[in-house]
Image (cartoon, rainbow, N blue to C red):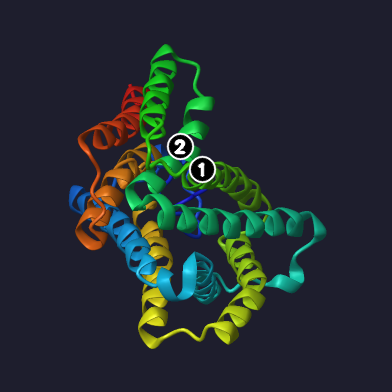
Amino acid sequence: MHAAPAPSTASAQPTPPAPSVPAPSDRAASAPEPDGRRMAALATLVGSGLSNQTGAAIGSLAFPVLGPLGVVAVRQYVASIVLFAVARPRLRSFTRHQWWPVLLLALVFGTMNLSLYTAIDRVGLGLAVTLEFLGPLAIALSAARRRVDACCALVAAAGVVTLMRPQPSADYLGMGLGLLAAACWASYILLNRTVGRRVPGAQGSAAAAAVSALMFLPVGMVLAIRNPPTPTALMYAVAAGVLASAVPYLADMFTLRRVSAPAFGLFMSVNPVLAGLVGWLVLGQNLGVIEWAAVGAVVAANALSILTSRR
């Protein structure tokens, strides 16, 4: 999950937000980036997506010992450490006007990751990430007023209906958790915009990550006492935090300064495909032809909306 305040969409596997993206007018006024740097930024963006999905897959390997709750708790700790080190928020200077959206962001951040990882445990990485991706896609399409965007919404809806069609082995609770993660991600994007306006830099995001980590601290302590984690499971959970939080955040800091918001959203739209591939290669989770077609429909809807909006 990347959820930057400005882009119309964000990556699957939500992570702490990157710095705000300059407005189009600001970009137009700035000197264009050399092609080499832009290509490096796009390559970093793809690498960030792979890191995100690989981190989630590795984290799921710790589910038998820690469960999704334990893995998410460790991930929140890692995210908090990384953001605090980068942003160094001045918490004592925050006003009540700044604190309330930060606290809401912390609540949404924790709920989003917990619902996503629980969905991954129940329905697999590819399906869970595709359902979660509906959150930023809905944000992007809701702000549009063109016929092509209405068609994109219908295509995405058809893909979701296909993924959630009745089957003997269908796990509707897992799918519902994926949709809950989507709703949380949409809320996360909107709250990030509010926090970004009220708190300078990434201080608000760092504060939200810290509060979220504190919320999970009692949970982590109880889990550690009741079922002490093995070194291997703990290593998997920490790797998930690094690959799905630290690496994507730092990558976004690099790429969002070098590519436009539409390009960012376009490249992030391939995350459901990356999730399906990583789930297959790392976890042995195979998607059928129909499922791949449904994932492609959701990705195509986002890509078409972004590409046509640039004309």
Looking at the rendering, which quadrant does residue 303 occupy?
A: top left
Q: Find residue 118 and report its horizontal and vertical position in percent.
A: 48, 57
Q: Which residue is mark 1?
A: 182
* Rendered-image quadrant of the C terminus: top left
Can the viewer see residue 11? no
- C-alpha span from label 1 to label 2: 6 Å
Q: Residue at x 64, y 52 (%)?
A: 195
- Type of the residue with mark 1: Ala
Q: Find residue 99 and report its horizontal and vertical position in percent.
A: 75, 60
Q: Find residue 285 and report its horizontal and vertical position in percent.
A: 26, 53
Q: Nearer the viewer, residue 143 or 30?
A: 143
- Type of the residue with mark 2: Leu
Q: Residues within 10 Å of mark 1 (few under 14, many from 20)?
A: many
Residue 75 is tagged as none
Q: Which residue is mark 2?
A: 134
- Residue 74 lies left or right of residue 260; in this view the side is right
Q: Residue at x 35, y 83 (%)?
A: 232
Q: Residue at x 58, y 77 (%)?
A: 220
Q: Earlier in the sequence, mark 1 or mark 2?
A: 2
Q: How many numbered callouts?
A: 2
Task: Tell me: residue 217, above or below residue 212.
Answer: below
- Residue 41 lies left or right of residue 26; in this view the side is left
Q: Residue at x 41, y 34 (%)?
A: 164
Instruction: Mark 1 and mark 2 in contact? Answer it, CB < 8 Å.
Output: yes
Q: Residues within 10 Å of mark 2 (few under 14, many from 20)?
A: many
- Residue 182 lies left or right of residue 271; in this view the side is right
